[in-house]
Image (tube, coloured by chain):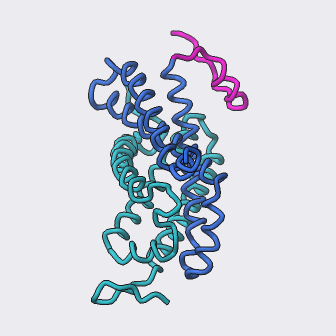
Amino acid sequence: MSEFKKFDQKNWVKTNLNYKKDPGSWAWILHRITGIALIAYLFMHIFSLSPLSQGRAAFNEFMSHYTTPFFMALEWILFAFVLFHSLNGVRIVLVDWADGARYHKALYRYSIVIGLVMFFAMGYVMFSHEIHNLFK
Amino acid sequence: MYKHQNSQGSGSFSWVFQRVTGLILVVVMIGHYILMHYTPESGHTYDAVLSRMQSNWYRVLDLTFLVLGMYHGLNGVWGIFRDYKLKPWQTITVMSLLIVLGLAFTLWGVKTILDIPYVQTTTGELLVK
């Protein structure tokens, strides 16, 4: 019987960084990072919408902070996270349930193309006013 | 031979449900993005939220999104922790934190949604206070 390497809980970051990675390994790592970011965002989202209970003035005052260009840029990045997690999530389901192991690398390439197109399309929608002002 | 050992269950239910909720969330997320489509005037004011929330369909959609999103997210975080072979006291701490935080924030979100008043008249106008 082959020897099992004892799991080293203290150095798990190093262990994760050191092994040889295929594109699928990066997908796995990014799926985790984007997932953690999205659940953190959900907590912040619940917090940031809670002034709805305090009436119009409080809510509008609160929301005025989130419509600045800085926050819109953050929202664009958030959309990139959502896109990656959604597209890779669909890829995971196809691998698990639809024989996707045979074509998961092609799926990965298609996902990247679809994701980039949707990311820039969303950028255009979000910043359409700014873009139109530039070319007036 | 491959039967799970040293745990309460195989985790197969949460594995399946993670995929099912994930697929539902993708669909709801597309709706959420189309409705909220990220321009400054696409309904982020109090009045816009109020008029949307006069429809119970909107409330049900938002509640579904909230509860499923929270479940999917925290189950995912738990899945990450499970990969790193926690000691029993770490398992209990992490599990308790996830459950308490998850329940507290879900209830907070549910309260926020349900607190929005119904102010529509029979003619469809808003009686806004």
- Region rendered in magenta: A1-22
Dividing the picture into quadrants, the one containing residue A54 is bottom right
Residue nearest the viewer, comparing A68 with B20: A68
Residue nearest the viewer, comparing B4 with B101: B101
Residue nearest the viewer, comparing A20 with B84: A20
Work out which residue is located at the far top of the displayed protein and give it. A1
User: What residue sits 39% from the left and 59% below the top?
Assistant: B35
Residue A125: percent from left, percent from top: 47, 48
Q: Is residue B110 magenta?
A: no
Check the rendered structure and report the hue given to chain B. Answer: cyan
- Classify B119 as above or below B81: below
Residue A75 in view: yes
Residue A112: percent from left, percent from top: 45, 27
Check the rendered structure and report the hue given to chain A. Answer: blue
Left/right of residue B49 with respect to residue B97 in the rendered view: left
Residue nearest the viewer, comparing A102 with A50: A50
- Classify A119 as above or below A17: below
User: What residue sits 40% from the left and 66% below the top?
Assistant: B63
Dividing the picture into quadrants, the one containing residue A15 is top right
